[in-house]
Image (cartoon, helix red, strand yellow):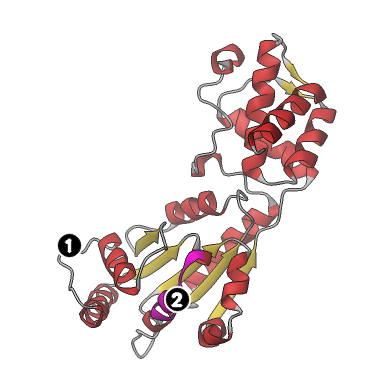
Amino acid sequence: MYQEYYGFREMPFNITPDPRFLYLSPTHLEALQHLKYGVAERKGFIVLVGEVGCGKTTLCRRFLNELNPDHYDTALILNPRVTETQMLKAILTELGETKLARSQVDLVAQMNRVLLDRIGRGRDIVLIIDEAQNLKTDVLEQIRLLSNLETDKQKLLQIVLMGQPELKEVLAREELRQLRQRILVHYELHPLSANDVRHYIQHRITLAGGTGRPNFTSWALRAIHRGSQGIPRIVNNLCDRALLAAFIRDSDEVNYWDVRRALRDMTNLTR
């Protein structure tokens, strides 16, 4: 409703993981650099942890967009609630393989052949698993075994595990100590600071085509930071509802009371 009123080309606070809208706060920039370093240096296992809604998936898509497609083949797994066999099939399918073996043993052999062939053609392979805290222990063990696939000089597969803070608890299990020892790059995303939230909001409004309308008052920004606790997805939800409240008032200013109304609406939805 407010898009045309404020002159936006598109909605500025959609919660879809569009990498164009990624705001590289200090913590997001550092996380991106950790991902790039781990893959470029072929570290094998990389873990990225962050709270729900902190921007892990958006950051992942930005990372994938920045990988050179002439050099890297990638597999992105978004639904990790699978068996070992299903995981192997999902990875091979993501890598573009159409004829898949049936048994788990044959799938591992096929994976080895596919990876060796691509490494032989000068390509690197990156596997990214989102929501990795949902992986079963036996599937994580299978992924560890995949990391054993290597030539005399390099690993055949670079593996990135992304997940919520519960992933740390999963990896701390005694039965996963071998996997834990292989994690050479680890980073945890932190919430946005008050200053980050201010820049984040302006960043998204500008990308959406905003030309100075509307203006968020300082008290509105403080309320957004406090109410969201610096989580980008919650910032988006609050800003979207606060903009609607300001639009209803025919105002070019989003004030503290607009944010309070947005917070109240969100609180009512969770009851």
Residue 7, horizontal then vertical, whole percent: 57, 16
State left or right for residue 148 relative to residue 270: left
Q: Would you say 116 lies left or right of 42 here?
A: left
Part of the protein shown in magenta: 134-142
Gap between marks 1 and 2 measured at Cα: 24 Å
User: In the rendered structure, which amino acid carries the disc numbered 1?
Assistant: Thr
Residue at 54% across, 52% down: 59
Residue drawn at (64%, 60%), measured in percent from left and top?
Answer: 30
Look at the picture and state if 229 lies above or below 148. above
Q: Is residue 176 visible?
A: yes
Badge 2 crowding class, 10 Å Cα cut-off, few under 14, some 14 to 19, many 20 or more, is: many
Q: Nearer the viewer, mark 1 or mark 2?
A: 2
Give the prevailing secondary structure in the magenta stretch: helix
Viewer-closest of 255 and 82: 82
Say which mark, if any, is on residue 140: 2
Q: Amino acid at mark 2?
A: Leu
The percent position of residue 45, horizontal first and vertical second, equals 50, 76
